[in-house]
Image (spheres, helix red, strand yellow):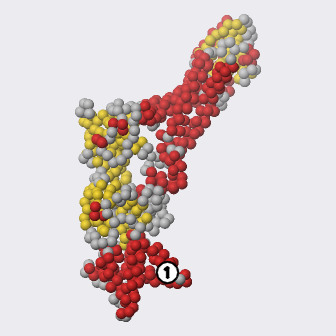
Amino acid sequence: MQHPTKRASFLDDLIELLSSMRFAISLLTVLAIASVIGTVVLQNQPANAYLNQFGQFWDPVFSRIGLYAVYNSGWFIAILAFLVLSTTLCIIRQFTPMLREIRGFRERAREASLRNFSHRASLEPTLPPEERSAAAIAYLTGEGFRFRVDEREGSTLIAAKRGSLGRFGYLLAHSAIVLICLGGLLDSNLPLALQMRLFGKTAVSGNMTFADVPASARLGPGNWSFRGNVYIPEGKISGYSVINVDEGVLLQPLPFTVELKRFHVDHYETGMPKRYASEVVITDNESGEVFERTLEVNKPFEHRGITLYQSGFDDGGSLLRFTVHGMTAGEHPAFPLNTEVGATIPLASSGGHTLEITGFRPINVENLSAPGSSGPPSTSFLGSGARAAGNNLRNLGPLYSYILRDPAGQAREYNNYMQPVQIAGHWYLISGVRTSRTDDVSWLRIPLDDDGSADAWFSIHQSFFVPERQVALIERFISHNPDKDERKSLKTVAGHVLTLFTKGGLEAIENFTVTNVPEDKRDEADMAFIQVLQSLTWEAWMMSREAAGKSVMEPDEINAPYLRDAFFALTASLRYGAPFYLQLTNFEQRQASVLQATRSPGKPLVYFGSLLLVLGVFAMLYIRERRLFVLFKKDEALVAMSSNRKTIDLNETFIRHCDGLAAALGASASQG
């Protein structure tokens, strides 16, 4: 017999908690904090942007708790759901008592209670008793009060009130919270998650065409809530919206097609985008009706309940023309390669590697005044430099990205600048490489010679790494020594040092000295070996000049910076991990527009809820309930007044009504 009572008690306690003010305030506080996080932390950005911003330790933590997509995270949606439940229960609990309070006049109020009011006065009317009620009623009616009369034994009570509708402000404000939260739930990922769970929809990943996407990754055309991206290159047509889900995508067919006629982008003097717009032709699938529109940021277009927003822009398959420079052992003459962004090219001549052209941006604004800006910032290809603090913003020109995948499937990501970059007064071709998005970027800086070309360095590189050229390089190196025996010794040393360097870099030379040279002679040996490598670099440079028909120079301080940079670039090339260097020589840009397509059933609820919230707050703040009681006794008229809120003007209002009633009753007031 006790268990049902305990269950009922537990249920009552649970409802009491869920509908309590403290519970709702706690939820609103958490939502406010989450909204601040969602405002401070840019939402739905590329994963590598967050990794670069927060580092390898905090990035996975923030990602796991959903800070990168706060408004679609499970805990945020759960809080919205609980807030809807809490506010709804609160409205249900308070509706009947509040309605009773709005409709009631309290005409049964007792005299003792009225005399305990803080605002009360006793009047001595001179009108005859039979005229007093009519006079008071006439005054109250003129002041906008509604009233009821309670005839009692030996007395008459007139209970009047005005402004009771202000209590509806409470219901309006709470109903607004429910509607806004419901709208948020309808436009969140909750409907999509339910579809995936109930109808077996599964996101797919990988590079495939729309036609190859399986039915399990396609949503129905009648899907009532979604938010996805429509990617359209210039001159192309699309009728699908792509919805990102975790590491994969779902395909949402649209009831119309979108053709991108032309994409416009204007830039500031710094090179940052100022305005971008899409000239599109929208064709209805059912009626064939055609609309021509120009979509811009904050200028969307809506058709069949779906709104198209200008979200961003991307590359639409730009044509790229490269010169491929070999960087492995063996004679590899430079050759041209013409392709486009998005292409995958098998390279049988490069050991079975596969080249994937992943991106191209013609304008890249970077902040070169940041600390450690002796080279390009490690986030250059993310475009984050333009957002950094500093006042040395520069457009570094076109940037192209590609992935080189070896036969085992291991990939390296390369990001190269087309135009030379000036660093500390010298010019370089810049290429960044990393094996994964969690790794730091390594930079290869290829120096340009006095005619602004990188050909000299590529020739130096071949002299170091092509066996046939190594022989000629060593012969040229030892030819400056007149002593035959010393030339033979130098040839042996140079050949050994060159072999060590080309196989393992300076680390291989250091390991050799540690193993074969006494400890007290190691530093001296290392310096001697490096001097040999630098001399070989100089001779390789002179060989390239002779081959190009240029004059041979003598080592001096003017040529020292190029010699140093060329040697450092040779060292960095050993870590570059590519059988070739891909140098962009020309391009034909093709733009693509990124539109956001949304069907938001919750938007009308949010708008209507916002209207109710404004009306509710206005009602609670500016519509004040006033209750005025006039109790007529034999020789006295007791006036009492109450309000649902104590305001500054309440005392003044009471005095005014007392004076008005006294004038109507022909009485003088005496404060009770």
Is residue 649 at all visible to an observer of this figure?
Answer: no
The amino acid sitting under disc 1 is Asn
Q: Is residue 320 above or below residue 157?
A: below
x, y percent for residue 122: 73, 17
Residue at 39% x, 83% y is 494
| Quadrant hosting residue 297 | top left
Residue at 37% x, 32% y is 223
| Quadrant hosting residue 288 | top left
Q: Is residue 631 above or below residue 650?
A: above
Residue at 28% x, 38% y is 257
Q: Residue furthest front?
A: 516
| Quadrant hosting residue 323 | bottom left
Q: Element under label 1?
A: helix
Q: Nearer the viewer, residue 592 or 468?
A: 468
Q: Residue furthest left?
A: 288
Apparent side of residue 454 relative to residue 618 in the rendered image (left or right)? left
The quarter of the picture where the N terminus appears is: top right
Q: Is residue 434 above or below residue 153?
A: below
x, y percent for residue 159: 65, 14
Apparent side of residue 360 relative to residue 618 in the rendered image (left or right)? left
Mark 1 Cα-neighbour bin, 10 Å: few <14, some 14–19, many ≥20 = few
Q: Nearer the viewer, residue 20 or 630?
A: 20
Is residue 524 at all visible to an observer of this figure?
Answer: yes
Q: Nearer the viewer, residue 655 or 164?
A: 164
Q: Determine which residue is flagged by label 1.
A: 516
Query: How many labels were placed on the picture?
Result: 1
Q: Nearer the viewer, residue 556 or 468?
A: 468
Q: Is residue 417 above or below residue 470?
A: above
x, y percent for residue 317: 29, 52
x, y percent for residue 667: 70, 15
Residue at 52% x, 42% y is 35
The quarter of the picture where the C terminus appears is: top right
